Image: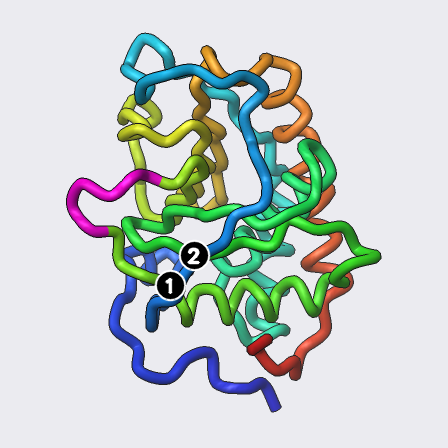
Amino acid sequence: MVAPLFQDRVYVDDFTASGFELVIGHAHDIATSLTLADYDVDGAPTGSDLRRVPVPLPAVLSAELDGAAAHLGVLDGKILLAALGRTVARTIGSGVVAVDVDSHIIALDCVMPSELDATQLLAHVCSALAGSTVRQPGQTLAELAFRCAGPVSAGEPLEGHLLELRAYRSNGVVQLDLWFDARRFDAYTVEELAEQFPQALIEITSEAIPGFTEAA
């Protein structure tokens, strides 16, 4: 039997009708241990600094995501977050990063399979969402953002994040975009993230097993 996703649910995004949902709970402190950017640049990115790289996701993989969510008893967005953590680990390095998930801050483990397998990583994502904190006005933005609601316009600004993964549906198929601050990232770093993400998603959807208990 799959353990309950959360107790004391306080937030649900508006993507449920399309099969996406993220539930956010209590707050905790986040100790980050990974720097994402290739370069250190002062100031938040403006519109002219931002670039978009689409993440190709075949329709068959979109269907596999939905099937895995039903099989595992979790929500699509949590699987995408787990895949994002694995992708960052493979491309940039292992560690913990703060992620802005629709204005809630979570700690995301970016680790290799030798550190957390697919099932364990997904459990950690569920617990991170349960322990998120609402971002306060004026609070420093997390370097990484994840938005799982839509449809989302590809032309919207990052609102200060250095890197953002957007997930939305078009004609029932999941679409993914990476937005990044071109001053802080080499183009090949973001291209590698885009190439690694589908592989990481396949790993999570094919290797994670149901019935896990969320990490403490």
Establish if 136 lies above or below 67. above
Residue in front for this viewpoint, 99 or 177: 99
For image coordinates 26% across by 58% down, the residue present is 134
Residue type highlighted by circle 2: Ile
Q: Which residues are magenta?
A: 136-141
SS majority, magenta: loop
Q: Which percent across, then down, holds residue 127?
A: 50, 71
Establish if 56 lies above or below 23. above
Query: Can the viewer see residue 134 in this picture?
Result: yes
Residue 74 left/right relative to 101: right
For image coordinates 48% across by 85% down, the residue present is 4
Q: Quadrant of the N terminus?
A: bottom right
Residue in front for this viewpoint, 113 or 62: 113
- The residue to which callout 1 is attached is 132
- The residue to which callout 2 is attached is 106
Quarter assignment of residue 189? top right
Query: Mark 2, residues whose alpha carbon is within 10 Å: few (<14), some, or many (≥20)?
Result: many
Q: Which percent across, then down, holds residue 119?
A: 70, 68
Query: Can the viewer see residue 170 in this picture?
Result: no
Residue 48 left/right relative to 176: left
Q: Given the current orientation, which residue lies at the most extreme right position?
A: 114
For image coordinates 39% across by 48% down, the residue present is 148
Any magenta on residue 61?
no
Residue 78 left/right relative to 196: left
Q: Quadrant of the C terminus?
A: bottom right
Q: Which label was assigned to residue 92?
A: none
Q: Which percent across, then down, holds residue 124?
A: 58, 67
Q: Which percent across, then down, holds residue 76?
A: 50, 59
Quarter assignment of residue 20? bottom left
